[in-house]
Amino acid sequence: MKNPFDIREYLTSQEVHFKEEGENIGMGSVGICCPSCGDDNYHMGIDVDTKLYNCWKCEEQGNLVKLIMLLEDCSTTSAFTRIKDGQYEKVIDRKNFQEQVQELLTQFSTIEEMAKPEKKKLEVPFTHHLHELDEQFIFDRMFLKFIKERNYSPEELAEWGIVAEVVGEYGYRLMFPVTYEGEIVSYLGRTVSNDKTKYKNCSNDTAIISMRKLLYGYDYITKGQDSLVICEGVFDTIRFGKGVAVGIFGKDMSVDQMALLCSLDIRKEIWIALDGEALYDADKIAKNLKPLVNAQVKILVLESGKDPDNYPREELLEMIK
């Protein structure tokens, strides 16, 4: 008789860091940083017995099958098979991470063709372009106040295609289009209100390409350029500037994201600039990336509790000279 699926053993084999006690960890649960919303404080609790999970931050929830699909971006059938066979090491095969990336790279032209949108066209939900926001209106002021507090201007964010949504599922959110080869293939929204769910991603059912296969800012990078910065989120990427950085939508890079980055053929330096408290995650990315690229891989160490978006652009660019 097979032993029950051990969630601790599974997470350990996948190098997914977890906690068994702490501020956000319930009794009988383990906590991980939610891969759905980019949480960095172990808000996703997984019940050790039932394997049901719930993120207190973005309210993502489901069972073990859905968790495996979320972490690995695999099919329902694959997740069921791996649970049945107890194949912990094959769900996210970190031992053969480099081999997986190299295999993707050898097929990259095919992957690019498959990824290109054909008939489906994705539109980002919005009610206002940023230049249309007016201080006279209370809801517009929420957006303008948020933008100013982050030390941006509406014009600067508009250059990235960012718009404002006031109504519906993404109400009171700045909307960030995510592009690939010039086409919008996904999007996410950042609340400007007191909503506890700071970021809300386009669902995989709606997206043309899953967020875990994309890099924010990818279209602004020139293949073969000298250097590149890897960031966690959209605002970090924007702070560095177009053509300087890409965002990975969290603290971990998927195999597909790694292959996409490798295809850029960066020549001299790749900097990993995660939040100040995420050195463990930055080191993990660096170890996976070093055997795959010709460029030197370096970690940008920031003050604890700070992320790149907390620094002026000039200071960030000085750090990576």
Image (cartoon, helix red, strand yellow):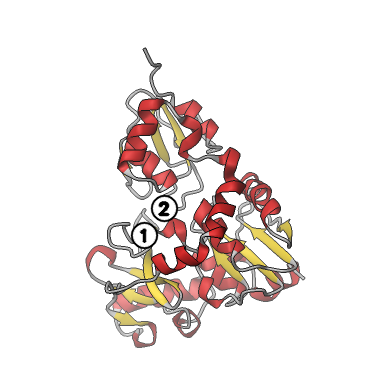
Residue that label 2 marks: 37
Disc 2 marks which amino acid? Cys
Quadrant location of the N terminus?
top left
Q: Position of residue 107 (x, y in %)?
A: 51, 60
In whole angstroms, how far apart are the C-alphas of marks 2 and 1? 7 Å
Q: Quadrant of residue 225?
A: bottom right
Residue that label 1 marks: 201
Check contact, mark 2 vs mark 1: CB within 8 A.
Answer: yes
Q: Quadrant of residue 302?
A: bottom right
Q: Position of residue 271 (x, y in %)?
A: 69, 61
Position of residue 99 in the picture relative to residue 57 (left or right)? right
Residue 265 higher or lower than 62, as above or below? below
Assign a secondary structure to mark 2.
loop
Quadrant location of the C terminus?
bottom right
Question: Is disc 1 surrounded by few (<14), some (14 to 19) or many (20+) residues within 10 Å?
Answer: many
Camera-side residue of 58 and 143: 58
Question: Is disc 2 surrounded by few (<14), some (14 to 19) or many (20+) residues within 10 Å?
Answer: many
Label 2 or label 1, whichever comes before in sequence order: 2
Judge whether residue 60 can be spotted in this image.
yes
Disc 1 marks which amino acid? Asn
Q: Position of residue 45 (x, y in %)?
A: 40, 36
Position of residue 15 in the picture relative to residue 318 (left or right)? left
Position of residue 222 in the picture relative to residue 79 (left or right)? right
Position of residue 107 in the picture relative to residue 95 (left or right)? left
